[in-house]
Amino acid sequence: MESTLFSLAHGFAIAFQPDNLWYAFLGCLVGTLVGVLPGIGPLSGISILLPVTFGLDATQAVIMLAGIYYGSQYGGSTTSILMRIPGEASSVMTCIDGNAMAKKGRAGAALCIAAVGSWVAGTFGVIALTVVAPPLATIALKFGPPEYTALLILGLIFLAYMSSSSLVRTLLMACIGLMLGMIGIDNMTGHFRYSFNLTELGDGIGIVPVAVGLFGLGEILATPSHKVIGEVIAPKFRELWPSRKEWNQSFWPIGRGTLLGFIIGIIPGSAHIISSFLSYALERRVSKNPEEFGHGAVAGVAGPESANNSASTGAFVPMLALGIPTGPIPAVLMGALMVHGVSPGPQLVTDHPDVFWGFVASMYVGNLMLLALNLPLVGLFVTVLRIPYAYLYPLIIMFCIIGVYEVNHSIVDVWIMLIMGVLGYALRKFSFDPAPLVLGLVIAPIFEQSLRQSLIMSNGNYLIFFSRPISAGLLIVCIVLLAMSAMTFILKRKDWRDKLAEAEAGEAQQ
Amino acid sequence: MNLPSPEKRMILRADHVAGAAFILFGCAIIALSGNLPVGALSMPGAGFLPMIVAVLTIVFGLALVLRASAESPPFAELDWADGKHALQVTAITAAATALYEHLGFIVTMLLTIMALLTIVERRNAVRVAIYAILIVGGTYVSFVYGLKTPLPEFGF
């Protein structure tokens, strides 16, 4: 513990360097704008801005990109409360009671409770990350190829299980991602795979063109400007402070949301989305006045907003400690670190302490910045919300092209982005969630290498995965999850995932 | 000749089309993997995992087709109202991609933003021109002088 505190102090020394403070501030500001603007989620925001960080060192890059990630969780609530449009997916539940509060003239209070809840949750998440990640990394050093293979399979199955779309759809997307991840030179034998004589494909397909295409361009293609309409409720600055009763009503929901969010964040899946839904359901269940939910219940804002912020931080635990992305956003962040020559994983803490501890400490600072940024600047965000979407999306397309091109100065990457944009549009039409595709793409090289190494180690005996306790345990969890999914399908029973899908669909229609 | 009643006639559903596309994709991968060695379990080759993933894609595609009638809406009911917008934006972005390295950042992006706003959004041409010049100029200065990131210049 003493060494952790010493390392954290070292991290603060890095985080307080003027350059790093500036990039944390920039990340938080851009993240909040990304969250505020409907149609640009954190994933597309991070993907589009990823190339901008190439001129920075690894610590500055990850500080800025993580700022965009947790900043977008803060910003998403502003649009939900003021317009009843979720700025990004995890703010869907905040729309219901947040906007109802705004219609009652309590928009300022709702924004303040959401911001304070997010700050408490974010700070708790970082403290837990500080405590949990280093020992977990020490345990992970004992992992060999079979354990990594089992862990990655568990990650994919868990994502499929937690997803609100069906298991088959999620696994299909993951398969397509794995296929894309295998394009290029095979690291173990040197064979060219599916590169069609294009030298640019020798190194494989990059995560940036795929993520920007699927989430940035794909979203634009599916969103004609006439569909983006909404009336903005503009709160006055003096109305931002909640009443004593509202503070009391938000105290326990913030606590519960924070804890629940962090636990869910560690588990693979789109944690920040799921956590806000579960927190809302929990608050309604424990409330003495469940009939208030949907009509401006304070707990309906405080719980989900705390949960999605805590989950965003929790998702960094497996990414930093194990080198395993638990969702598409950590996957893109991992890609960003790898571009800078830093491999996330158990050795990150020892090999790159500046990056690890600088990043953790910057999150403490970033959470404070967001609290200071969100409330006083609410007027600015309201102004941004009034920019017509028709003028906004050409700008986003321009940034998509610049961003993707600048990674390798390759026009082939821009064509890949365009193809992925059309694919993303088609996938939306057929109700597929493209997120597992990105996850598959990122884990494909690690998964293939660890699987083949395991089989070589055991001379082709696949029982190696069951003869080692950790990998056997992980695979047993996979089997249990698959069995649970099969049970739900066979018994045709609605579980919480179906309810989540219904809630998302309901909000999308309104 | 007895035709099945309308209720019993098979309806083409969205998942039938999607599942078939995935099956075709899986088959295409297997066909393209012809020259890649699969190897043995004790020494897996470059074609080992692609083959497994392609087979899984076919199996999941088949599952999608089989479950289509229970889970998926009719293909004819899919909402393509945004199709025109998507097509126009795709065409303009494709043109921008083709021209980017030849016309350079400034000319390509000016034309792209103006095309998107005048052709797709039907906005006033003068306002659009002013907006495009301000945005493209601002972005160029920010990237080239602020972020020290060179952008493609004009030149065939």
Image: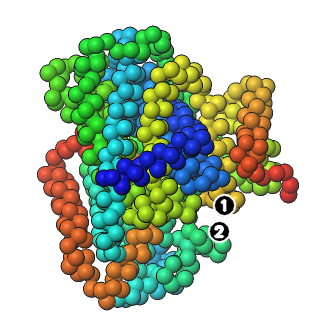
Pick the front one: B133 or A508: B133
- A153 horizontally vs B134: left or right: left
Three-letter code, disc 2:
Glu
Pick the front one: A376 or A22: A22
Q: Mark on residue A65?
A: none
Above/below status of A381 relative to A186: above
- Res A60 seen here: yes
**Residue drawn at point x = 23 percent, y = 66 percent:** A474
Q: Mark on residue A408?
A: 1
Disc 2 is placed on an element classified as helix
Same chain for marks 2 and 1? Answer: yes
Disc 1 is placed on an element classified as helix
> Which tag is nearer the camera, tag 2 or tag 1?
1
Residue, disc 2: A200
Q: What percent of the width, then of the height, locates residue B70? A: 26, 50
Q: What percent of the width, then of the height, locates residue A233? A: 46, 15
In which chain is the residue bearing label 1? A
Pick the front one: B33 or A190: A190
At label 2, counting other C-alpha atoms closer than 10 Å, the crowd grade (few under 14, some 14-19, many 20 or more) is: some
> What is the C-alpha distance between the residues marked 2 and 1?
9 Å
- B94 horizontally vs A80: left or right: right
In which chain is the residue bearing label 2? A
Q: State the colouring used for the structure image.
A: rainbow
**Residue drawn at point x = 40 percent, y = 84 percent:** B44
Above/below status of A364 relative to A331: above
- A393 horizontally vs A429: left or right: right
At label 1, counting other C-alpha atoms closer than 10 Å, the crowd grade (few under 14, some 14-19, many 20 or more) is: few
| Quadrant position of residue A161 | bottom left
Asked whether the residues under the numbered discs 2 and 1 touch, taking CB atoms below 8 Å apart as contact, a structural biologist would say yes
| Quadrant position of residue A105 | top left
